[in-house]
Image: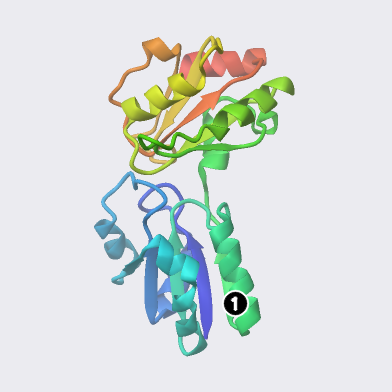
Amino acid sequence: MAFYLIGLGLDLESLSLEALEAIEECDKVYLENYTVEFPYNILKLETVIGKKFSPLTRIMVENEGFLEDAKKQDIALLVYGSPLTATTHISLILKCKELGINYKVFHNASIFDAVAESGLQIYKFGKTASMPKWEANHKPDSFRKILLDNMKICAHTLILVDIGLTFPEALEQLKTALRGMTLEKIVVCSQLGTFAKKKFYYNKISGLPLDIHPPFCFVIPSKLHFMEEEALEKFS
């Protein structure tokens, strides 16, 4: 009996062969679908894995109750991208250790390596920031502080955008949070890891199109190496 924590990667058919073999042996398959807007129809995923899955809400994952099933049978949790980029999933592994449940992690591609296809060098990135969806009376902008801290050490800033924000909404939040700051150009990455849909945009904020599709993220570049600048100009 075991728990399999499986990264789906970034496209519909990005699952590894060993992950597919593990899923084949599972009695139950769960899907976490609340952290990202998938760039494909998730129902098609059932065809790829050859099994039906049960979606789990954030509360259900964080309550960890579904792990009890792994005491009696093999179960899997499918996670978009790579499964250990969120602290919630580390908690699941700790819970398995506490309960004496065998587990295995199947890693996969994520935004953290796919963003390098823009031409920006990964080792020049600083701390990653998240942009939540603002409410009328709650507008957290901690990503601004992270950006300022990264700029002090000449590091690029990756800003992950929460589910539920359209591109125009996210762009407006970014412009509001950047109050008083002057930026030359920014990078927008859309649907990274997909073969046909991925796009990179490198422009001034005022020059960006508004019909950018999720999942997307912002990158605020620091000082660019000449190869980074050449790549951004050619790939975007």
Q: Residue at x 63, y 16 (%)?
A: 227
Question: In the rendered structure, which amino acid carries the disc numbered 1?
Answer: Cys
Residue, far front: 137
Answer with left or right where residue 39 lies relative to residue 155. left
189 vs 228, nearest the viewer? 189
Q: Residue at x 67, y 32 (%)?
A: 126
Residue 9: image location, x then y, percent:
46, 51
User: Is residue 21 something that shows in the picture?
Assistant: no
Q: Residue at x 70, y 33 (%)?
A: 123
| Above-or-below relation of 220 to 37 | above
| Above-or-below relation of 172 to 165 | above
Helix or strand or loop: what does disc 1 sit on? Answer: helix
Residue 98: image location, x then y, percent:
64, 80
Residue, far bottom: 72
| Above-or-below relation of 188 to 193 | above
168 vs 29, nearest the viewer? 168
Total numbered labels placed on residues in the image: 1
Answer with left or right where residue 222 lies relative to residue 48. right
**What colouring does the structure picture have?**
rainbow
Quarter of the figure with the C terminus: top left
Pointer 1 local density, CA inside 10 Å: few below 14, some 14–19, many at least 20: many
Residue, far right: 153
Q: Residue at x 64, y 33 (%)?
A: 122
| Above-or-below relation of 15 to 136 | below
Residue 93: image location, x then y, percent:
60, 70
Residue 46: image location, x then y, percent:
29, 64
User: Is residue 169 something that shows in the picture?
Assistant: yes
Residue 176, quarter of the rendered image: top left
The residue wearing badge 1 is 96
148 vs 70, nearest the viewer? 148
